[in-house]
Amino acid sequence: MAEHTSSSITIEAAPADVMSVIADFARYPEWTGEVKEAEVLATDDRGRAEQVRLVLDAGAIKDDHVLAYTWKSDHEVSWSLVKSQMLRSLDGTYALAPLDGGARTEVTYRLAVDVKIPLLGMIKRKAEKVIIDRALAGLKKRVESAPQG
């Protein structure tokens, strides 16, 4: 993976509750500011998304792209770019670590983006940081406001 940007947040919910929100792509437009549309194109034998088409509007980065997802465990999912109009590559990971016996979860989001148009490394890292911070804040708000099952 290329240079990446990483950030973490603690969510007041069990890892399974956090992962269920992460895996519910159809609802991304409801809680992520950047994702305007999400469509699962293929699923694995457990019903988890393997390919997802996302329409993204993140200010400087507007794109319609397809990501391939790899579910490494019940606590980790990663993705990479299949096709895009604007991006050369996009690699990311959500890693969940249970805290307090699983009552809370530390979520770490790693992201590396390479765009087809030239961008200074500093600007690219700033864009990655904004995307990560917004996603983690949105995820925390979504999970913590959902009825826990």
Image (cartoon, rainbow, N blue to C red):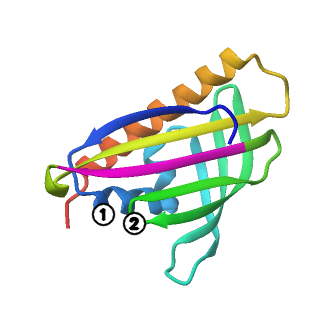
State the separation of the CA atoms marked 2 and 1.
7 Å
Secondary structure that dominates the magenta span:
strand
Give SS at disc 1: helix
Circle 2 packing at 10 Å, graded few (<14), some (14-19), many (20+), is few
Q: Residue at x 68, y 42 (%)?
A: 1
Nearer-N-terminus badge (2/1): 1
Residue nearer the viewer, 48 or 142: 48
Image location (x, y in percent) of residue 147: 20, 59
Question: What residue sits right under mark 1 in the picture?
Answer: 16
Looking at the rendering, the stretch of residues picked out in magenta corresponds to: 90-99
The outermost residue toward the bottom is 45
Question: What residue sits right under mark 2 in the picture?
Answer: 74
User: On the picture, is 42 further left or further right than 85?
Assistant: left
Q: Nearer the viewer, mark 2 or mark 1?
A: 2
Residue 44 badge: none
Image location (x, y in percent) of residue 29: 51, 49
Q: Quadrant of residue 74?
A: bottom left
Q: Residue at x 22, y 52 (%)?
A: 13
Give SS at disc 2: loop
User: On the picture, is 108 further left or further right than 62?
Assistant: left
